[in-house]
Image (tube, rainbow, N blue to C red):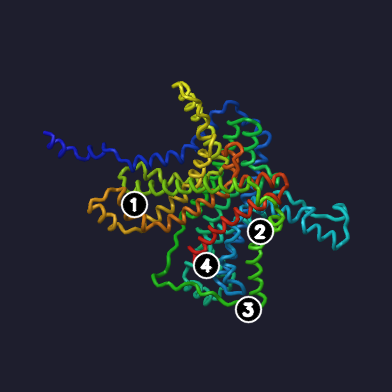
Amino acid sequence: MSEQTSQIFPPRASKLRFDPWSVGAAAIAALVLLPILAVIWFALTPTENIWPHLMRTTLPRYLSNTAFLMVLVGFFTAAIGTGSAWLVVMYRFPGRGWLQWALLMPLAVPAYVGAYALVDFLEYAGPVQTSLREVFGWQTSRDYWFPNIRTREAAVVVLTAALYPYVYILARAAFREQSGTAYEVARALGAGPFARFWRVGLPLARPAIAAGVAVVMMETVNDFGTVDYFAVQTLTTGIFSVWLQGGNLGGAAQLATCVLGLIVILVTLEKLGRRRSRFFNTGRGARPVTPVEMQGWVAWLSTALCLFPFLVGFVLPVAVLFRHAFNAAQWVDTGLWRAIFHTITVGGVAAALTVAAGVFMVYGVRLSRKKLPRLLMPVTAIGYAAPGAVLGLGILVPLAALDNQVADLVVWFGGADPGLIMTGSAGALTLAYVVRFFAIGQGAADAALGRVSPSLPMAARSLGRSSGGTLWAVHMPLVRASLGSALLLVFVDCVKELPATLLLRPFSYETLATRVHAKASLENITDAAPAALMITLVGLCAVALLARANR
């Protein structure tokens, strides 16, 4: 009877069987999505609804400044990134060989570090105004006019210089992958250099450029250090003000939902804008683009145009930092080395957990036949789009409540009060990093595992290997290099992350990013320089990895 039953109902039995891979993938997805859902819940159920007050007072200013930065930074990064990518791919000019890699280097300098360096360079006591007074004999600031540095226009300059490589690297890859035949046909039909760019190259590269600009705008919304230093009130600074200074969780959550709304609108517009676009190579044997040799002043003008963003985005801030670092006694300060230790440990643990969770989820979804994990996996990428301040809000409050419940339970059973387990340690900060950068680990794991031939794991399973054994013995050796690159990228992003770190770090717990912010906020750029240089050095490792991957 039992044999007949098993033959009649085999599908039902298989559905009821416990699948640890599906359960684990769903748990990871829930962990990534819960902070976003928590913020939305806080916004919908505030204890004190100050939304009408915000709409009458500060919200219009927050929205206008945020939109101003997003639009202008997006426009200028698109122009600089696309223009420089077009020049280095399509033409040969002096310095092209090293400039195509140097244009990536501003990625190593966080925007808030660039802001501190620019102000130090242009302020009244800085080298520019000091030299002007010495040359022209001016005595005080009343003797001459100099533009105000700490404005939202200056924030646009700093953010553009730090973020244009996102557009540049995607546009460069798109131009390189195009067929040289199309440009030869356009040239034969009488199209000049600008016409070939505007009518052939730009339409074909538009999806990549749009994706880069979308990332830039999301990073602009996420920025806190730059706008706070320049006293530009945006939605992100508003979250800090309403929550930490005003003590209103519901109001901060409502501002956070505005930020999430902007991100959703931005991503939706980007996808709708290229929904009907289809681009194909004309043939399997399409010839690559052959760079055209430039001559005379045009060649040197191209060199200058590509050199300028590199100088502003990398050379200037690094030079300012070096000038102060040589005079700093902070290199022997125990606080600096404690911040380095905290940064390495928390960033390293978060990077390892992020990549491991990404591998587990991707592998679990590939093994699972259930629809829910497959539907949840793309949604988990939202963490990367959510600003650090939003994630900090959605993580800190629920974890603090959980910590209190656990402590009360331990005391009720007669134990000693354990204190705040997660929020009193670096646990909450580590979780924020995992949620924020999970999309990087998941994307790298998905791409790497997708390149493994299905015949290899099938052979391992036929020889008696379990699912976990197959992952460890077959997949991991083949994808180790890709996962190592993802590990480095996540670690670098953890090192540079500022808003979430400021909100979630324990008391008196400093990382390199918070140390730089604290010192520079007190106008002490000399003591901030060593930590800022350490962040830049770590960022250069990621830039070197990107350069190697895009050769």
Residue situated in front as seen by the camera: 292 or 493: 493
Instruction: Say which amino acid is labelled 2.
Output: Val
Asked if disc 1 and disc 2 are in contact, CB closer than 8 Å, the reply is no
Q: Residue at x 64, y 62 (%)?
A: 309
Q: Residue at x 60, y 46 (%)?
A: 339
Distance between mark 3 and mark 1 Cα atoms: 56 Å
Q: Position of residue 253 (x, y in %)?
A: 57, 34
Distance between mark 1 and mark 2 Cα atoms: 42 Å
Of marks 2 and 3, which one's residue comes earlier in the chain? 3
Distance between mark 2 and mark 4 Cα atoms: 38 Å
Of marks 1 and 2, which one's residue comes earlier in the chain? 2
Q: Is residue 315 above or below residue 390?
A: below
- Per the image, the residue denoted by label 4 is 200
Mark seen at residue 472:
1
Task: Confirm whether residue 538 shows in the render.
Answer: yes
- Per the image, the residue denoted by label 3 is 295
Q: Secondary structure at mark 1?
A: helix
For disc 1, the neighbor class at 10 Å (few under 14, some 14 to 19, many from 20) is: few
- Per the image, the residue denoted by label 2 is 318
Q: Position of residue 20 (x, y in %)?
A: 32, 41
